[in-house]
Amino acid sequence: MRESAELLSGMALGSFRLNGQFLHVAEGLARPAGMTAAWWQVLGAVLDEPLPVAGIARVMGMTRQGVQRIADLLVERGLAEYRPNPAHRRAKLLRPTAEGRAAIAEIIPGHQEFADRLVGELGVETARDCLEALCRLSAALDRLGDSP
C-alpha cells in the first residue's frame, strides 16, 4: 500500500474515532438540558439564522432525512418552529423557539468548562493548529467532491 492510501486510512479512522469522542462529550453536555447531541447540533445550526432542512444538513454534514426527523421532533417538543421561506414555498425554515434558546443556554456553562479543560490540556496554539488542520482537511474533501 502506498503512503497516500495509508494516510487516507489513518485520517478516516482518526476522524471516525474523534467523531465518536465528540458525540460522547456532546451527549454528556446536552443531557442536563433534556437534549441529545443530535438535537443540539440541529438547533445550534439555526441559532443565528433560520435555515431549511437541506441547508442544515449541508452545514452539519448530516443527511437531509436525518435532519428532517430531528427537526420534526424539535418542533413537536416546542424547541423549534417552522416558518415560511420566502425563497422556497415548500422548504420551510427552521428556527429555535424561546424554549429552544433556553435549552441551549443551559448547555453553555458545561460547554465552556469543558472547552477550558480541553484547551488547557492542548495549549492554545496547538488547539488553533488542530482547528486549522481540520478546516483544511474538510475543505480539501469538499473540493474533491462526493465520489472517489
Image: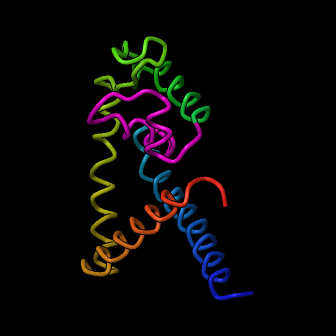
Vertical relation: 98 (above or below) 42: above
Front residue of 91 and 32: 91
- Residue 33: image x %, image y %? 40, 40
Give the quarter of the image for residue 131.
bottom left
Residue 14 in which image quadrant: bottom right
Number of marks present in the image shown: 0
The x and y percentages for residue 84 are: 37, 12
Magenta span has 47? Answer: yes
2 vs 80: above or below: below
Residue 31: image location, x then y, percent: 47, 45
Going by the picture, which residue comes out furthest to the right? 1
Q: Residue at x 50, y 39 (%)?
A: 57
- Image point (61%, 53%), residue name: 146
Residue in the image at 33% along x and 39% along y: 104
Looking at the image, residue 72 lies above or below residue 118: above
Residue 126 position, x and y percent, is: 31, 81
Residue 17 horizontal side relative to residue 143, left or right: right
Position of 45 with respect to 102 (left or right) is right
Location of the C terminus (image quadrant)? bottom right
| Residue 54 located within the stretch drawn in magenta | yes
Specify the segment rendered in magenta.
35-63
